[in-house]
Image: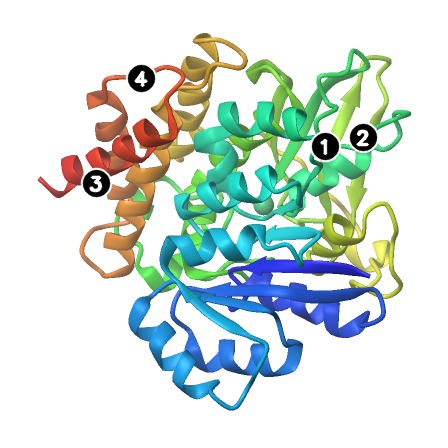
């Protein structure tokens, strides 16, 4: 029996993780759950899965849930960051699924590693902003980390052809030439900057292939999502920036691939369905039956591959620049640049979703924050969180 702590259990990845537990009750169980404030759904989840700990980040919502669960014994309701750390590292869990959104994921991931939990990581920000802290810790505590992000899962699956590739941190392998990180291109692929200037929240939320949360759907439209994935892949697979190539692939059938030095390209294909990468991370190295719909290549017919459009997607081009500059400080050093890139994007997307700025203001705000930032190399956790707060302050001015 594998016992899971699911952080962010009311979000899209969290709910699909619980769907997997529901499907395999003999093999998977829930030790802890956490959510920000969605009390209704969290209450249902607690009653169904009976975790020992449930954390509600928001204190008022935690009080509400405690009230509602008074008839239930065996579940402790915790709150705030301390509650989240407790849920991430509780004794009863074997694996921590980090599916919270944002930099709030860093500390619980660290706590889970320190407690020796296997990590299934859906949170991008953790490796993007704190890869230089997390990666050495995995070695020190002998902990495995499996990616849930579909592209990184595809790369991880493709690396399985190398003997001994039991861990994602295996890509800095001499046989690996580079990775091909695929991107659908989002709803605005083929449009110009001028056209996108007046695009609305509604336009941006129409993703052609994947159904995801609001923030990540906007990130897909700006291609910031792919930029963050490049930064994540660098840490996850131990790659240099020039070993990461983004390929626009509108059909979202090839989920990413690895190029080997002998010319072989091995990739993972499938229907666009997050249930598969979730299953692979949680059940690795086993594969379960009927997780995602079977891919029918005859229905797909043809696959296209295009170069990314850096001219009209300036936030994506900037991600490449940030990655290069950051890597320039040292392969394992890390800087606050990705923190600023990520925080500025978070701020800008929140404004955009509130209708307070235009779509193309998102890349402009990120550019401004990155340009005005004074870089700190090898930042501590405190310095990372400071850089985040400073970025928000700068953009509010
Ligand atoms: Mg992805």
- Circle 3 residue: 392
Question: x%, y% of residue 88?
Answer: 55, 52
Q: Is 170 left, or right, of 5 in this rendering? A: right
**Contact flag, marks 4 and 3 (Cβ < 8 Å):** no
SS for tag 1?
loop
Question: x%, y% of residue 175?
Answer: 82, 14
Q: Whole-Å distance between the Cαs marked 3 and 2?
A: 38 Å
- Circle 2 residue: 159
Q: Residue furthest bottom?
A: 71
User: Looking at the rendering, which quadrant does residue 241 occupy?
Assistant: top right
Q: Is mark 1 within 8 Å of ligand 1?
A: no
Q: Quarter containing ligand 1?
A: top right
**Contact flag, marks 3 and 1 (Cβ < 8 Å):** no
Q: Whole-Å distance between the Cαs marked 2 and 1?
A: 8 Å
Of mark 2 and mark 4, the one earlier in the sequence is 2
Question: x%, y% of residue 285?
Answer: 86, 45
Question: x%, y% of residue 302?
Answer: 77, 47
Closest to the camera, between mark 4 and mark 3, is 4
Q: Nearer the viewer, residue 185 or 231?
A: 231
88 above or below 32?
above
SS for tag 3?
helix
Q: Residue at x 87, y 54 (%)?
A: 287
127 above or below 65?
above
SS for tag 2?
helix
Q: Whole-Å distance between the Cαs marked 4 and 1?
A: 28 Å
Q: Residue at x 40, y 21 (%)?
A: 322
| Residue 376, numbered label | 4
Of mark 3 and mark 1, the one earlier in the sequence is 1
Callout 1 crowding tier (Cα within 10 Å): few <14, some 14–19, many ≥20: many
Of mark 2 and mark 1, the one earlier in the sequence is 2
SS for tag 4?
loop
**Contact flag, marks 2 and 1 (Cβ < 8 Å):** yes
């Amino acid at each position: 029996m594998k016992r899971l702590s699911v952080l962010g259990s009311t979000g899209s990845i969290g709910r699909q993780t619980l769907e997997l537990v529901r499907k395999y009750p003999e093999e998977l169980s829930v030790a802890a759950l956490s959510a920000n404030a969605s009390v209704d759904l969290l209450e249902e989840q607690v009653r169904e899965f009976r975790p020992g700990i449930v954390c509600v980040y928001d204190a008022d919502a935690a009080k509400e849930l405690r009230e509602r669960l008074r008839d239930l014994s065996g579940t402790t309701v915790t709150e705030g960051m301390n509650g989240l750390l407790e849920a991430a590292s509780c004794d009863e869990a074997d694996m921590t699924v980090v599916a919270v959104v944002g930099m709030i994921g860093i500390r619980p991931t660290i706590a889970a590693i320190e407690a020796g939990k296997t990590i299934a990581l859906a949170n991008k920000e953790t490796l993007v902003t704190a890869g230089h802290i997390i990666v050495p810790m995995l070695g020190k505590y002998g902990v495995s980390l499996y990616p849930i992000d579909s592209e990184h899962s595809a790369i991880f699956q493709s690396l399985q052809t190398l003997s001994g590739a039991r861990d994602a941190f295996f890509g800095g392998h001499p046989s690996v030439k580079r990775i091909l990180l695929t991107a659908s291109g989002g709803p605005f692929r083929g449009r110009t900057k001028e056209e996108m200037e007046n695009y609305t929240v509604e336009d941006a939320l129409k993703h052609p292939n994947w159904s995801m949360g609001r923030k990540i759907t906007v990130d897909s439209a700006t291609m910031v999502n792919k930029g963050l994935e490049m930064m994540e892949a660098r840490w996850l697979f131990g790659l240099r920036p020039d070993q990461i190539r983004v390929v626009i692939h509108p059909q979202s059938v090839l989920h990413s691939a690895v190029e080997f030095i002998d010319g072989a390209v091995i990739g993972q294909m499938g229907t666009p369905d997050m249930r598969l990468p979730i299953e692979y991370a949680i059940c690795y190295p086993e594969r379960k039956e009927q997780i995602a719909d079977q891919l029918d290549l005859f229905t797909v017919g043809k696959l296209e591959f295009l170069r990314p459009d850096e001219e009209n997607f300036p936030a994506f081009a900037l991600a490449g620049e940030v990655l290069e500059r950051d890597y320039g400080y040292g392969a394992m050093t890390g800087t606050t640049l990705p923190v600023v890139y990520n925080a500025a994007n978070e701020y800008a997307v929140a404004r955009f979703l509130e209708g307070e700025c235009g779509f193309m203001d998102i890349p402009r705000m990120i550019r401004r924050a990155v340009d005005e930032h004074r870089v700190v190399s090898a930042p501590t956790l405190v310095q990372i969180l400071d850089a985040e707060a400073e970025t928000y302050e700068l953009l509010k001015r």
